[in-house]
Image: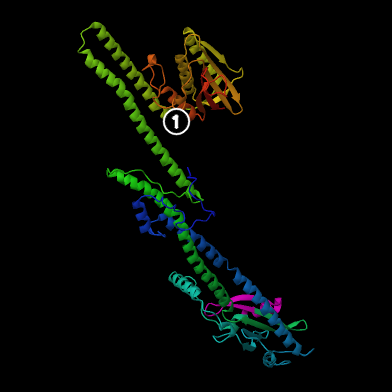
Amino acid sequence: MRDLSTPTQDGDVVLGDDWVAPDNTGSDELRARRERRGLFSLRGSPLTRKIITFNLIALNVLVAGILYLNSSRDSLAVQRAASLVAEAELIADVIEAKLPEGQPVNLATGTGVDVPEALAAIDLRGGIDVFVFDPSEVLVAQSQNGLGAGSDAAEGNSPTLLTDGLSWVWNRISGAFGIGSGGEAVALEEKFMPLIASTLENGTRTDNTLDGDGGTLLTVLTPIMQGDTAVGVVAIASAAGEIDNLVRSERERVLQMFVIATVVSIGLSLVLASTIANPLADLAAAAELSRDKNSRKVNPGRIRIPDLTARPDEIGRLSGALRGMVSALYNRIDGNEQFAADVAHEIKNPLASLRSAVGTLRMVKRDDQREKLLDVIDHDVRRLDRLVSDISNASRLDSELVKEEQEQFDLLHMVGNLGEYLGEDAKSKGIDFITDLPDEPIMVHGLEARLAQVFVNLITNAISFCEDGDAIRVWARKRENRVLVVVEDTGPGIPEQALSKIFKRFYSQRPEEHFGNNSGLGLAISKQIIEAHGGVIWAENIRPTEADITSDPLGARFVVGLPT
């Protein structure tokens, strides 16, 4: 259970060792282990390694997916292709404007138009290569502004160390398996020639191709029209590797963010692991220290579970639960020790009486004295037998309450049967026995035999205190979600100083003539059974008026409350 006196934190985020409750952190050995471990325990904590590994796996999958999908490359290619198509058609329009109307044109011989001069007059932007072919695939003119290291596309690019490094690794791996080996270098104009016939027939077309170094080239071919007749083809190619350079820069930024995210993820994972693995290690170490001490036959003392209840999370709940379990265990151990001490004390008294009687029996000569001593011995032996039987029943009660299966049964039927049986014993002693039970059954969930034991104890206890002319009344009433069963008598009542003690083990408040006839465990066992069923039991005196608590009692009343 949580210790309500322990201050809790306001927020839900717990970092580092904020969970440690002051002045309650366990033994010196536990503190020494924590100091040796430090804040980040990567080597000695498999849980820490798992947290870091799983976080990095998720991050790597995300980055690999971004690089694999490569949407930026496709978008750049589409935009660049549209730009090249517009430029190719513009160049073709300029050349078409210089063609004479109604006259034959031959671009290869310069008949009708001077293509090199027309092409040179056009202000072409850097980064593209322009070729003009006639229908017979003869290169008429060209303007190369995009090839070579000095082109605009090759200048001004930021270094891409991460991308180049990964590309180098991939090239080495693919080279070892013969993957992706480049082909022979082919001149750019030779790549256009097989496409000229298709362009003259079908119009403008765009293609992707590779240069001699494996770089991507975007090419556009569009026809030069004289009226309805195609008299040539304008071919444009982007700068060598222009798209690859742009994509490489984009990937480099992604990889840079990946490196930063990896460092941050590892740091946050270590902090997260320190708030999970470290307190769990402390909880385990507390139990291990006690186990090691026990294995060395050293007095271990009490197990001190670290107080982590200040944490507003599951580990705080776990610490509170473990502390509550350990506390309950020690309470049970203390109770058993106290029970053993009480048993030894209770057994010692009749044994001392027996020893004295046996020793005196050897010395007396008169028969009447010997008979009196034999009666004492017989009384003490029966007292020991009763005491041992009650102690045995009490010691087995806890385990039997856990093992036995609870069932639904009619409580009034059970109390009525007990009243009929025990009522005959009461009436034989001149005691009036009255039962007042409702007609409707009252169903409860529990162990019928154990609850019957409780009411047998209460009724027989009332009979033992009553005399000829007294009365006992057993009645029951249902109150919402509980039922009350009351056993009343008109006996001498209960002394005020005994009301708080009668449910304790081995406590008995009886007249001298009943000495030794009871072990003092009946009411203690009854209380244990009732509480195991989630109920309550208490005792009180019946008074003529509740206003005057000093008036003599008219009898005793025992009340049992059970959930329905």
Q: Position of residue 546 (x, y in %)?
A: 57, 23
Magenta-drawn segment: 194-219
User: Vertically, is 382 above or below 237?
Assistant: above
Q: Is residue 417 left or right of residue 142?
A: left
Q: Residue at x 46, y 43 (%)?
A: 321
What percent of the width, then of the height, locates residue 497?
Answer: 45, 26
Q: Is residue 267 left or right of residue 78?
A: left
Q: Is residue 211 magenta?
A: yes
Image quarter of residue 206: bottom right
Quarter of image, res 359: top left
In which quarter of the view is residue 543 placed?
top right
Who is closer to the viewer here, 387 or 556? 556
Reply above or below: 527 against 324: above
| Quarter that holds the C terminus | top right
Looking at the picture, which amino acid does disc 1 mark? Val
413 is higher (above) or lower (below) than 267: above
- The residue carrying mark 1 is 402
Nearest the eye: 464 or 74:
464
Q: Position of residue 540 (x, y in %)?
A: 51, 23
